[in-house]
Amino acid sequence: MTLEFIPPAKPIIGEDERKAVDAVLASGQVAQGPQVHSFEEEFSAQVVDGVESVAVNSGTSALHIGLLASGIGAGDEVIVPSFTFAATGNSVALAGAKPVFADIDVETFTLDPASIEASITEHTAAIMPVHLYGLPANMTEIRRIADAHGLKIFEDCAQAHAASIDGKHVGTFGTFGAFSFYPTKNMTSGEGGMITTSDAEVARKARMIRNQGMEKRYANEYVGLNNRMTDIHAAIGRVQLTKLEGWTKARQANAAFLSQGITEAVTPVVPTGYVHVYHQYTIRLEGATGEERDRFTAALKDEYQVGSGVYYPIPNHRLPSLAPFAPGLELPNTEKVAAECVSLPVHPSLSQADLERIVEGVNKLAKAGA
């Protein structure tokens, strides 16, 4: 019997989303308009404890515009993890500042407070943690460090919609948070992003920067960008937002089954009081090299028809684009997890049989050293 392939991610787009898009097309107003405004208000109320939201055309734009609206520019340094998607460091560089790469905690995959402290210089302006894979970073310690050194906090929440610590949602801890609605995220708008902030001036600037630097037509106050979200994308996002809570619970239930069943690899750690939303379910093959890990993922696909992902095999500080910012830098924890990590399917479309096959394949192959 041929097994059906289990994809590592599966965007869910249904009739509700199609109807919402058709309604926008029929309205004749497809650029930034009432759908964007409603999406912003609903996202604020449901995901970020009521702080203001500003919709843009991608998660990267949310980071970039958030930095610009917060006054980051030439001469500033922003501490970021190297174990993340390149957009984190890219956004700092695009703002004219210097990304400074710090190491991570091997258990949570998020910024290590000790490495943050060691990375602070007289030019450090902010810390930008990434809530990686859907788990919040250690915001208690990051806040302590930021306050002690007079630094701002910016949050990369691209993978962490509705994640929280002790009931406080990510995107509300710092000057701004940045979310992504890329198709494989926990919810999508087709493409898009959201800036969240309790700082009214940051929100005002972000709204102008996304719109060519103007609040009033042809009265440009800032050098701006064309990074607006369309009503088409916002309409999709509004529908997806109504389903986010259910999908998150499904991801968490799937993750609980995987964690209970997988015994031959290191499964995700969730600190007390933290809510993990499992954008990715990421295991570690303790002690594996990158080559050994790649053989494991190939065997998982070939023998069990289970897809997986490796996020991220090349740390940012070694990418040709970002390495010039970090000459000679060594981040041992980052290098270790970059070789050991495998992200397994955890999306809401998985069946019980899918979950059982994933557990069986991981345990057998990891034990055999595939």
Image (tube, grey):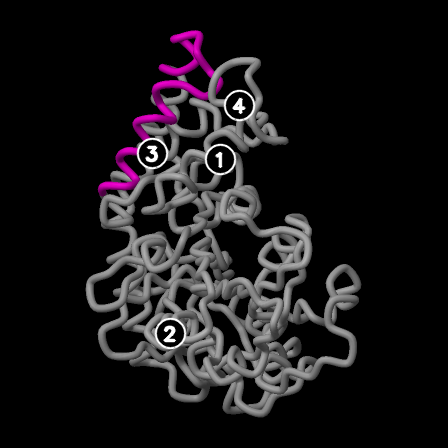
**Hey, what amino acid is under mark 3?**
Glu
Which residue is under mark 4? 214
Q: Name the kind of residue labelled 1 in the image.
A: Val
| Residue extending farthest left | 167
- Is residue 4 among what the camera can see? no
Counting residues from the N terminus, which is met first, the one under dot 1 or under dot 4? Answer: 1
Q: Position of residue 318 (x, y in %)?
A: 74, 71
Report how far apart the C-alphas of labels 1 and 2 lie in the structure: 27 Å
Seen in the picture, residue 321 relative to 205 is either above or below; the reply is below
Q: Which residue is mark 3?
A: 40
Q: Residue 93 falls in which quadrant of the image? A: bottom right
Q: Earlier in the sequence, mark 3 or mark 1?
A: 3
Q: Is residue 140 above or below residue 134?
A: below
Q: Identify the residue position indicated by label 2 in the image.
A: 138
Give the labeled residue for mark 1. Answer: 56
For label 4, the crowd category at 10 Å Cα-Cα, with few meaning under 14, some 14 to 19 and many 20 or more, is some
Classed neighbour count for the residue bearing mark 3: other residues with Cα under 10 Å, few (<14), some (14–19), many (≥20):
many
Q: Are marks 4 and 3 in contact (CB under 8 Å)?
A: no
Q: Earlier in the sequence, mark 2 or mark 4?
A: 2
Secondary element type, mark 4: loop
Task: Report the Cα–Cα distance between label 4 and label 3.
Answer: 19 Å
Under mark 4, the amino acid is Met
Q: CA distance from mark 3 to mark 1?
A: 10 Å
Residue depth check, mark 2 versus mark 4: number of the one nearer the observer: 4
Q: Is residue 31 magenta?
A: yes
